[in-house]
Amino acid sequence: MAKIVLIDDDDAVRRTIVRMLEVTPHEVHEAADGDAGVALCQSVRPDLVITDLMMPQKEGIETIRTLKQDQPSLKILAISGGGQSGSVDFLDMARSLGADEGLQKPFRRAELVEVVNRLLGV
């Protein structure tokens, strides 16, 4: 069983993702923002982090950078409903800064589980 830290400022999104991952044997820990997520990662030492990109306080790109500095081999899945702003694609930017994969919200359970399993090597 792998440990996953889920970071998203939207309670409903976190609840939905936790329900989606109930079909897996993984242990999911939740944080409501990047600062709380980084602190949680330091204590939990997860195998995978799923982080939203658009959050108040410490947003996802900064969170990814911080996590990768502390744990360079940590697998990270970036999620975003933001898409693009002008010519900037936030998921592409997240990948270039350390995220291993990106999923555009909304996504289906099967998509999420497939990416999570691939990143965890299951």
Image (spheres, rainbow, N blue to C red):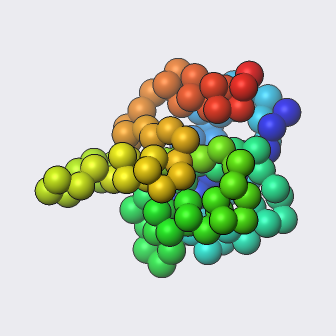
Horizontal and vertical percent position of residue 54: 39, 62
Using the image, determine if residue 46 lies above or below residue 113. below
Front residue (pair 22, 7): 7
Front residue (pair 122, 32): 122
Query: Does the rendering let one see residue 28?
Result: no
- Relative to 47, 59 lies left or right: left
Using the image, determine if residue 112 lies above or below residue 65. above
Q: Report the label total.
A: 0
Query: Does the rendering let one see residue 62?
Result: yes
Using the image, determine if residue 22 lies above or below residue 30. above
Horizontal and vertical percent position of residue 102: 45, 40
- Relative to 87, 61 lies left or right: right
Which residue appears at 77% of the width and 50% of the height? Answer: 46
Instruction: Indicate the quadrant where residue 37 lies.
Output: bottom right
- Residue that lies at the very extreme toward the bottom in this rendered image: 57
Which residue appears at 79% of the width and 66% of the height? Answer: 42
Which residue appears at 43% of the width and 74% of the height? Answer: 56
Where does the N terminus fall, quadrant-wise?
top right
Front residue (pair 30, 40): 40
